[in-house]
Amino acid sequence: MSVPISKKIALTGGAGFWFTTAVEEAGLPSIMLTDGPHGVRRQVGSSDHVGLGEAAPATCFPPAVALSSTWSRKTLEEVGEALGDEAHALGVGILLGPGANIKRSPLCGRNFEYFSEDPYVTGELAGAFVKGVQSKGVGTSLKHFAANNQETDRMRRSSEVDERTLREIYLRGFGKVVKSAQPWTVMCSYNKVNGVPAAENRFLLTDILRDEWGFAGFVVSDWGAVHDRVKALKAGLDLQMPADGGVGDAAVANALEAADIDEATIDRAYGRIQRVLSRATAHADADRTTGWDVDAHHALARRVAEQCIVLLKNDGVLPLARDAKLAVVGEFARTPRYQGAGSSRVNPTRLDNALDAITALVGDEVPFAPGFATDPQEPVAIAREADVVIAFLGLGENHESEGYDRTTLDLPLEQLTLLEDILEVNQNVVVVLSNGSSVLVSPFADRVPAIVEGWLLGQAGGPAMADVLFGVVNPSGKLTETIPARPQDVPSYLHFPGDASGVRYGEGLFVGYRGYDAAATEVSYPFGHGLSYTTFAYSDLTVTATATGIDVTVTVTNTGQRMGREIVQAYVSIADSAVVRVPRELKGFADITLDPGRSGTVAITIEADDLAYWSPIHRRWVVEGGAYTVHVGASSRDLRLAGVVELPGNEPTAPATPQTTLGELMKAPQAAMVFQAALAGLFGDASDDPETRRIMADMPIATIAGFVGLQPQQLDDLLADANRAMGL
Ligand code: BGC
């Protein structure tokens, strides 16, 4: 049956809050799209996208901030599969996640939904998540595209970012996911990018997403991000969500009549949505399940949470002995902070806390005092009596959320005061943190023997934390965001969150560890850091150039007493680059689990594509030829071994012009020969003088020609000779 144009237009707008419009003529029922990234939020009753209304129970897995600390593609895929099963059982066709935005500042209130300050690890992990969900016949929505790195004024503000930075830092992770996992949908963000709303941004939605990356699904708007559906459709958006009371449909119909949009543009959007929804429908009809194994998914959430926990510091107090005289302080031990606030909020199937789990492990009541918002005498009293105090500190829901940014990196004052009070009577304090993005630990890090970063660990995080504290589980998570020592050290500090005139990404490429490393800034804990109860040694690095990049192998040995998992990281730098470079960038990682005393080989493949920089001059990706150093280690600042490899590169050979500098010409051997002879003729012996050469290196040929009185024709001939010698 042919589909009337009015129905095609209707499919480009939603039905209600969470559903697509049904098109009977095409056999397309209404499909549900809903959040989200770490659990299915299928609302029952009233609808909203800020996490207010009740939702059907679903497993709350650790949010991306914690998941990313696993550095495990396998784990992300497994979580994705479980989410796919739950979505299917709950009648959800497309899950609105993962979020692949870069953590430009730890202040961003929504960092808990994002993976990292680094695009490589973001792209790898988000890609694995998408593969997992979609393997179950459920779609994903890669969001928020693009440069949505703050919550402040997120619906209006323009992210002002130069193209190289945009592509290398803010888009690279998205591109990786699109190319490796083909998400069914991509969600545009609310903000503007360089003045153009993301929903109307042809450069992003068509030129890059479709033409360069080959995205085959449909683009959905963030909820309420479209202000002009006609403009949005033309730019490459396909589905406006949620329903807008028919306003957008009418605008498109009018524009069609006025020949302001052509039917082909509407057909294009319709076709893209229809193809994806047909897939969703086929799956929804096939073997509809009515539930899932709630206990098995809870157990998975716990296993995953165990891998997310990052041991920041341990002078030997951990793991705790079960017969140690303990005191537990901090409300988060009893009332866990386990997920973020806003549209991703899940109604968990169960919720386990750390206090119960600690009590179960030690087989007895443990003295506990909530500590904050209560009488501060009590925690101090129990701390005084204890051998070890476990202090559960962190950020409450009112401190960080979707919708607004934090204004400080500090823990709440009442918690810092509580910690000071405890430290006066007992210095043996293990600090356990619950937070959705880095907090400052510098006020106390030197004065406590251990710090455990628990992020937000999902519904089964409590027992996972208890197991780590008592050594039932050996911690293995590592940071995917730096913990700065001072707020003013954060590279985006001077440019966050901007104002009504826009937010200028003034730090450019120097985001996160790229910036700290370039400025040699002291940090509390660097990107990639995380301790274990065992130790690992690195040896026998091999680094080999291949046709497609670099193959790396390294031997890792468990030199301690316990089985453990080590996350091996490969950072790459290039010497004497022609363009601005950060000192080192993560370009590969892998993990290995080893029994004590055992060794294993870790293999990492670095793709040449990942080594390319965006050249605004050539308007393309360029792999620079030259010597690349691969640093392999346990964190960005614990680099154990390095190897150098020569890569051929694919720089376009630019013809010499009057504006080419002498230095540039001398780098091309054939052109250098031509000019060497010419210079000798013009300057005699002085042409060989290194000082003269150095001074002239940055001079355009035309300028030198002017100095020595070369005639225009002579200059043209010289350049033609040089270009001929270069085969151009
Ligand atoms: C959020 C999206 C979310 C949508 C639907 C928006 O406010 O930015 O991430 O998927 O609401 O809940």
Image (cartoon, rainbow, N blue to C red):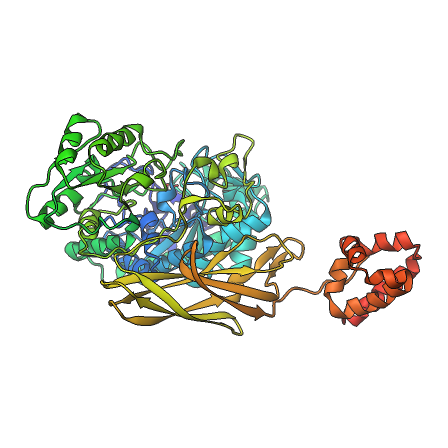
Q: Residue at x 23, y 64 (%)?
A: 563
Pick the residue in front: 499 or 480.
Answer: 480
Question: Which residue: 57% across, 46% down?
Answer: 261
Q: Identify which residue, 73 or 696, lies in the foreground.
A: 696
**Residue 407 appears in which quarter of the rendering?**
top left
Does the image show residue 425? Answer: yes
Q: Is residue 116 left or right of residue 476?
A: right
Q: In this view, does 61 lie to the left or right of 190?
A: left
Of the pair 349 and 5, the residue shown nearer to us: 349
Locate residue 325, reporting x and y percent.
11, 43
Residue at the left extreme, as displayed: 364
Can residue 263 be seen here?
no
**Quarter of the render that holds ligand 1:** top left
Q: In which quarter of the image is the C terminus?
A: bottom right
**Where is the N terminus found, in terms of image quarters?**
bottom left
Place of residue 307 in the rendered image (x, y in percent of width and height, measured from the top left)? 27, 55
Image mark count: 0
Q: Which residue is drawn at 17% across and 33% down?
A: 370
Q: Is residue 274 above or below residue 668?
A: above
Placement of 13 over or under 645, stated as above or below: above
- The residue at 76%/63% (across/down) is 666
Q: Horizontal and vertical percent for residue 150? A: 44, 38
Residue 627 place in picture, x, y as percent: 58, 66
